[in-house]
């Protein structure tokens, strides 16, 4: 069966609307359980301090001569716990903050990307984002989650 051109164009246009809608700029996986940490003054302070710490370390690393930088990278791979003391404390502090569990496939609006890393290893470049849940039973909740849990879909921020 051959579809009229207008049906194809309308279908493509409607499919593209979701891709351009900021309420669908990120989504979770169908089998996921995400802890969304509610935003507060304390959470913003924790995230800002962690971001400054991560930036300072990155600047330190960038300033090293190439050979020393490679040695540091090797040491970080062999002894990750040496480099994770402050981040582990930050992640533990974030885990103690109030939040909600978001289950299943949900869509999110990305409100902010921080420079605070949320990975449990020193090499990863996973960051905390501030999101608003835009679909499902948790619709309307806002908070922070790691971008490992909620993936950008390619929509606009």
Image (cartoon, rainbow, N blue to C red):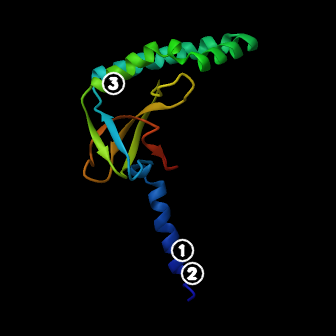
State left or right for residue 123 relative to residue 42: right
Closer to viewer: mark 3 or mark 1: 3
Q: Position of residue 157 (x, y in %)?
A: 46, 43
Q: Which mark is residue 94?
A: 3
Q: Which residue is mark 1?
A: 9
Residue positioned 55% across, 85% down in the render: 4
**Quadrant in the picture for the N terminus:** bottom right
- Mark 3 residue element: helix
Q: Residue furthest front?
A: 78
Residue behind mark 2: 5
Q: Is residue 43 found left or right of 1 in the rendered image? A: left
Q: Is residue 90 left or right of residue 122?
A: left
The numbered mark, 2 or 3, whose residue comes first in the sequence reads 2
Specify whether 145 is left or right of 7: left
Q: Kindly indicate whether the residue at mark 3 contacts the one at mark 2 (C-beta within 8 angstroms).
A: no
Q: Position of residue 63 (x, y in %)?
A: 67, 11
Are the residues at dot 2 and dot 1 in contact (C-beta closer than 8 Å)? yes
Kindly identify the residue that appears in the image at 44 percent across and 13 percent down. 86
Q: Which image quadrant is residue 40 in? A: top left
Task: Please report whichever mark, 3 or 1, sits nearer to the chain's N-terminal start.
Answer: 1
Residue at point 48%, 55% (across, down):
20
């Amino acid at each position: 069966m051959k579809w009229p051109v207008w049906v194809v164009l309308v279908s493509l246009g409607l499919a593209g609307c979701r891709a351009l809608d900021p309420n669908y700029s990120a989504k979770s996986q169908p089998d996921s359980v995400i802890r969304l940490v509610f935003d507060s003054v304390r959470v913003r302070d924790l995230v800002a301090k962690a971001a400054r710490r991560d930036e300072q370390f990155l600047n330190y690393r960038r300033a090293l001569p190439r050979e020393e930088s490679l040695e540091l990278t090797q040491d970080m791979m062999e002894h990750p716990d040496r480099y994770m003391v402050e981040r582990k404390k930050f992640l533990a502090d974030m885990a103690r903050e109030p939040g909600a569990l978001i289950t299943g496939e949900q869509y999110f609006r990305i409100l902010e990307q921080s420079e605070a890393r949320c990975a449990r290893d020193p090499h990863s470049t996973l960051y905390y984002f501030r999101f608003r849940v835009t679909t499902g039973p948790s619709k309307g909740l806002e908070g922070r989650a790691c971008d490992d849990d909620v993936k950008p879909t390619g929509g606009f921020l």
